[in-house]
Image: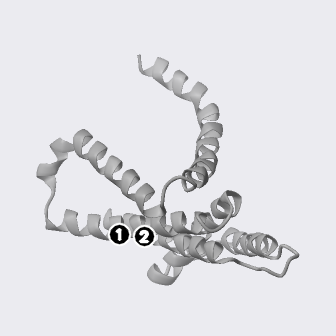
Amino acid sequence: NTTMNETLLKKLAKPMLILAPVIWGSSFVVMKHSLDSFTPFYLLAFRFTAAAVLLGLVCWKSWRAMDRSYLKSGLVIGTFLFLAYAFQTFGLDRTTSGKNAFLTTVYVLLVPFGCALLFHQKLQKSNLIAAVMMLVGIGLLSLDGQGGGLNPGDILTLICGFLFAGHIIAVEQCQK
């Protein structure tokens, strides 16, 4: 039975690795079109309320394990996550879905730099190469030939990237 499960997981691994970014990337387009009908606050309220209810129902047995430390960690992590999504959604309302998706991913670059700064972890050469590549990408996006540079939505989205990085770092620290 274990061998059969491992075989199934191996067969599903590559398709799932392809499906994950397809779903993630398409969500920006869906959210952008949703903003044509709903305000950013309404979308955020709906998403977070639905998630809270669903998690509350699925994880109701875990509620007894909550103590003050657990709640404090949840407050810190949840605040970072909410602010990240808020800045992302308001940014998406003011920029294109492609720029919003690209600029959001600045968190991938910021996490190792944040850990190096806050926890004195050593940066790898690949982190520096990635930083240069990300800056070049942001430059290419913002230098659109029309002299506009980064618009307000792009700036909100960059802030969201910093907040997602803070969220990831907080999750890591709260698990220790």
Q: Position of residue 12 (x, y in %)?
A: 58, 28
- Farthest residue, direction right: 145
Pick the quarter of the image with the C terminus. bottom left
What amino acid type is highlighted by mark number 2? Answer: Leu
**Can see residue 59?**
yes
Q: Position of residue 21 (x, y in %)?
A: 63, 45
**Can see residue 172?**
no
- Name the quadrant containing residue 54: top left
- Farthest residue, direction left: 64
Report, in whole angstroms, how far the alpha carbon at label 1 lies from the one at label 2.
6 Å
Q: Which of the numbered marks, if any, corresponds to residue 112?
A: none
Packing grade of label 1 (10 A; few <14, some 14-19, many >=20) is: some
Q: Is residue 94 above or below residue 9?
A: below
Q: At 26% from the left edge and 39% from the top edge, which residue is drawn?
A: 58
Q: Position of residue 123 (x, y in %)?
A: 60, 75
**Are the two marked residues, 1 and 2, in contact with CB atoms closer than 8 angstroms?**
yes
Q: Nearer the viewer, residue 105 or 146?
A: 146
Q: Which of the numbered marks, if any, corresponds to residue 83?
A: 2
What amino acid type is highlighted by mark number 1? Answer: Thr
Q: Position of residue 26 (x, y in %)?
A: 63, 46
Q: Nearer the viewer, residue 153 or 161?
A: 153
Q: At 57% from the left edge and 74% from the top edge, which residue is drawn?
A: 156
Packing grade of label 2 (10 A; few <14, some 14-19, many >=20) is: some
- Name the quadrant containing residue 60: top left
Q: At 38% from the left edge and 64% from the top edge, which residue is drawn?
A: 171
Q: Is residue 90 above or below residue 2?
A: below
119 relative to 48 in the view: left or right? right
Residue at image mark 1: 79
